[in-house]
Structures are given as C-alpha cells and as structure tokens.
Image (cartoon, coloured by chain):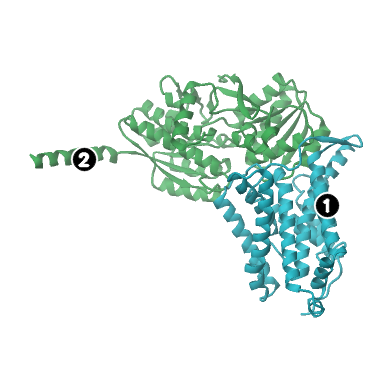
Chain colours: A green, B cyan
Amino acid sequence: MKSTLLVGALLTAITTTGAFAQAIKLADVAELSGGGATVGTNWKNGIDLAIEEINAKGGVLGRKLEVTHADSQSNPGVARAQVQKALDAEPYVLLGPGYSGSVKVTAPLAAEAGIAQIMGGEAAELTQAGNKFLFRTSFGQQSSMPKVAKYIHDDMKAKSVAVVWVNNDFGRGGRDVVVKELERLGSKVVADLSTEAGQADFAADVGKIKAANPDAVFVYLNEEESARILKELKRQGVTAPLMGETTLIGQKVIELAGDAANGARGHVGLTTDAPVDLIKGFRDRFSKKYNYVPDHNGLKGYLAVYMVKATTEKMGKVDSKAFADTLHGLTIKAADEPGILMDVTFDQNGDIDRQSFLVEVVEGKQVVKQVLPKVK
Amino acid sequence: MSNLFDLLVAGLATGAIYALVAVGFTLLWQTSQTINFAQGEFVMLPAFLMLAAMHVGAPFWLAIILGILLSMLLLGLAFKMLLVDPMMRHGVLPLAIATMALAIGIKEAVKQFFSAEASPFPSIVPTGDISILGHAVSLQSIGVLVLAILAVFGLTALLNRTSLGHQMQAAAQNPTVARIIGVPVERMILLTFLINAFLVALASLLITPIYLAKFSSGEVLGQAAFIAAIVGGFNQVRGAIAGGLLIGVLDNLAAAYVSTQYRAAVPMIFLIVVILFRPQGLLGRAEERTV
C-alpha cells in the first residue's frame, strides 16, 4: 500500500514537473542599477507581479510563464551585451529595456533573431525604423506630443510657448514633434532651449524664459532636472502655466520640487492615479506585494506580460515566430483580458493607441483633470 | 537688461558658493600642499549627514549642527590623520591621487548607504522675493550670497586680525621659522583642515536645496571650485574668492549669451587663457619652491 502511494506520488510529481518543464520562457533586460534604477526596478516588479498572477490562474494555454532578469546598469553598451546573451537562450519574447537609448541599440538584435521585443522606451524614432518586432507599452512621442500641443493651444489658449528640453535622444525626439505640432496649430515657439542631462543650475535658462514672456512653458526634461527647473521657475517668479509630460509631474518630481511643483500640468499615458478601477486594483496589489506605490514603469512591466498572454491566447499556440505578426493590428479589450487594464490597439509599427490623462499637481498630489480618449 | 541683473544675482549666488569651496582648496594647499580632489564630494557629504540626522528624528537646526560637527570630525580631523599625514611624506602627487580615490569612495558609499536617486533638502533661507532697484530678487539668492560673504569675511578677519590667524599664516608661509619662534605648526595645519571642513559643510547647506542631495552632485562643484581657485590664484584666499564669483557669473552669462550647450566649456577656456597669460592666477603671487 505504501509503495503504491509512493509510486502515485512520484507519478504525480513527474507529470506535474512535465507540465512545468514546458514553461514559456521570457527574458527581461532592464535598468536595475545606475541612473535608471527606479525605472528598471518598477518595470521588473510589474513583470513579476503579472507572472505570479497568471501562473496562479494556470498560466497561458496551460503552461506556466518564467522570466529571467538581467541588469543593463542603465548603460546602452551593457544593455546590448545582456540582450545578446538573453537572445542566445532563445526566449519566447524579450521584455525591456526601459531607456530609449538602450532600446535603440538592442532592437536590431531582437529583430535579427526574429523575436518580439516589448519595451518601455518612448522616443519617437524607435518605431519609425521599420522594425517589425518592436512593441511599445506606452505612448511614443508621436502619439503623446500632438495631444500635448493640442492642449497647450486649445485649453491653455497659449499664443506663444517656451520649449525647454534635455539634449538627448528622448528630449530631442519630443521637442521635434511638439514644436512642429505647435506651429501647425498656430502657437508660436518664442524660446527653444536645450539643456544638458544632469544640469544643476537653471538660472540662465529660466532667465531666457522670463525674457521671452511666453503664455505657456513646455518642460521636457528628466525627473531630477524637472524638479530643479520647477524650483528655479518659482524662484524667479515665472507665472506662465507649465505643461509637460509624465516626467514633469511624476511622484519623484513632486517629492523633490515640493511646493514648486504645484500647478504644473502634464499629459500622462499611464498613471497609477488614473480613475480606472482595474488600475486601482493593480496599484493595490502592487503596493501590498512591494510596500511602495508603483510609478508608470510598474504599469508598463505589468502590461508587457499581459500583452504576451493576450497575444498567445489569440494565436491559440506558443509560436515565437508568429507572435509579432499577431500583435500588429491587435485590439485587446480590458473586458476580455482584465490584466491589460485599458482597451488598447497596436498598429503596424508597434505603436499603441489608448486613452490617456491630463494631470495637474494640486497641493503636492497628482490630480487627473481630464481623460483624453483613444485617437481612433 | 532686467535679465542681465537677474543673471548677475544668480551668478554671484552660485559663485559665492564656489568661492567657499575654492577658499578651502587654497587653505589646504598653503598650509600642507594638499590638492584635495575630493573637495566636491566634501560638499556633497555634509548634506547627507544632515539628512541622516533628520531621518533619525533630529529637527533641522540640530541636524545642521550635527552635520557641521560630523563634517569637521570626518572631513577635517579624520581626513588629515588617516589620509593626508600618512600620504604626505610620499609627495604631492601620491596625495593628490589618494584624494581622487577618496572622492570615488565617498560617492560610492553615499550611493550604497543612501540612494542613487536625488533627495530633496530643506532650505535655511525662506523662499520668496524682495524688490531691489525695481527688480524682484529671490530671497534664496540673497541669503546664499550674504551667508557666503559673511563666512568669507569672518575667515579673512580671523586670518588677518587675530593672533591665531597670524600664526596660521606664519605656519603656511614658512613652517621652519614659524616653529623656531614657537608657533604650533601642526596644530595650525589641523585648524585649516577643520576650517575647510566647516566651509564645505556651509557650502553644502547653501547649495543642496538648489542642486538636490545626490551622490554625484560634488563632481560639478569640485571642478568649478578647482577652476575658480586656479583662476583666482591658488595661493591667495582673496584670489579664490574672486575666482569663485567670476566663474559663477561667467557660467551664467555664458549659458544666456553664448550657448547652453557650450556653457561648461566657457570657464575651461577662460582657465586656459589665464594659465597661458597669468599662470599665478589673477590675484595670485608667483611662487618658487625649493625642491
């Protein structure tokens, strides 16, 4: 009797491990240390949370998901080496990196291997190089900047705008799109100021903004520099309304800039403060697991995994080669796949269309002022 | 024109902080031939010491006092006894390289024990504006400028008007003779290290609310102050003050009227010109050393 039980137990173990051995392997390369550590850690935690949830409900097509995390050290060179290493292990889908500069140098590798890459970068050019394997988790600048320009022109009624941007791939990409759109709509760019990444002193830049006396200021810098310029704008008494993107009104910026962040507005593709029940649920589960409130990068990582799930279930098979083709043109509805949080459509370039939010900082808190609908 | 006025005020405020740090450079050089390449990190660290004190519950004023005292202990006393004294006998260059290593060590330690991310830091000067000659000038700029000038005046008075200051000068100018006439040279050298630690802690207190507390924020400051000290004259306290103010103003004017991209290059170009045409610095004395 004992031996029968033992054999039974062994058999169960073998069959179960058998099913697990067929796990779907994902590879993640993210900014786990260095300047982008906040970005990468949120992204990674989002991925882990989604995988845990999916596996707890029986996996994808009955197979469990597995992920390996590698650290790009926020350095494009290291990212490239890590992505090559990850691709050599032939993952089903590649996740990350989060920095546009790192995505730019790794995307050709994934494309050459024919493996879909779901990443966090937002620079406009990433999806414009004809890469058939690259997918975003958030808006590219070509989707968000027209919304920003429209808001500055229509809602802020600004006839003249000062544009401050950071002189790297991210900043230049956003600046180019927003300036073009503003001029098309008839708002004049009266100051066009490039600044350096890591810049500490913004007195001269703000002096130039003051001299140009614009109706609105568009600020497109990384988080720390955003906080510094907000303080300097307040210090020099600039009263023109401030508009930006996620990086101007993020939680870290509010913490660093304090009072100076109040009144700043920004277009946000993803925010954990969105008035959407599914996002609130995500935020609660994430906060419970990791003991902190995630930023939009946590959402991106989470969505990346649910993109894998929805696409695979749509195909009805685990097929790495057909994955990218299936995701192109796919609309995933939150009603069918709650993990995707909001209805989303992917176009032929891997860009997304989704509703977004207009946020204002009120007394140190992000307040969603408007929900901007999907474009199509 | 109003723009120029604002730029000058902002430049002078930043320059005054560079001056505090640059004065420290010259003090250490004069008394002990130490070129401290960790001077920028010395400015970064006190802010984190103050933040740590606040983190364990100390009110801001107490955190400032603790931060300054700890800085004098670590960046003054310990720096001299554990690094400068043992390295000094091997010459100026090994010591300079040791301070570079120290700079990396401090940066990495702060990154490890605090965070790689920037933290906010409270300002001792209230925010707001006052009107000067019809221009709105921020209280923060004025406060920084006034405090830095007071510190520099205090130091100059100490050096020129007190017996202690005269002894320090004697120790710096000719240690052998100073010893013969009974000046406690070693104690005077230690005193300059403590004064340097006090000045960097003050600079940290003034600049961190604007630059934010971050492990890497000393790099820019250290470089600017080093340039300021050379431009002004490495062997003169008044040279370092003038150099600091000049570099602060020049940096802001360059960003406004030359180009933001090349702002960092302008002080460097100025440095090269000074070294070519007046190697002892604008206010420095030509110096000859026995080998």
The residue that appears at 26% across and 37% down in the rendered structure is A19
Q: Which residue is mark 1?
A: B150
Dot 1, crowdedness within 10 Å: few (<14), some or many (≥20)? few
Q: Nearer the viewer, mark 2 or mark 1?
A: 1
The residue drawn where x is 38% and y is 47% is A89
The numbered dot on residue B227 is none
In the drawing, does residue A14 fall left or right of residue A336?
A: left
Which quarter of the picture shows residue A140? top right
Q: Are marks 2 and 1 on the same chain?
A: no
- Which corner quadrant of the image does residue B137 belong to? top right
At a point 77% along the width and 53% down the height, the residue shown is B18
Residue B6 in view in this figure: yes
- Image coordinates of residue B291 in percent, x first then y, are 76, 80
Task: Using the image, name the chain to which the residue with label 1 belongs.
Answer: B
Residue A98 visible, this orientation: no
Quarter in which the C terminus of chain A is drawn = top right
Q: Residue furthest left?
A: A1
Identified by mark 2, the residue type is: Ala
| B185 vs B122, nearest the viewer | B185
Identify residue for label 2: A13
Task: Give the percent coordinates (x, y) of residue B212.
Answer: 67, 44
Judged left or right of residue B282, residue B30 is: left
In the rendered image, the vertical position of residue A31 relative to residue B104, given as above or below: above
Can you say whether B122 is above or below A335 in the image? Answer: below
Q: Circle 2 marks a residue in which chain?
A: A
Seen in the image, is B132 located left or right of residue B65?
A: right
Relative height, residue A227 to residue A187 (above, below): below
Helix, strand or loop status at disc 2: helix
Which residue lies at the image location 79% right of the left edge and 45% below the top edge? B259
Assign a secondary structure to mark 1: helix
Amino acid residing under circle 1: Leu
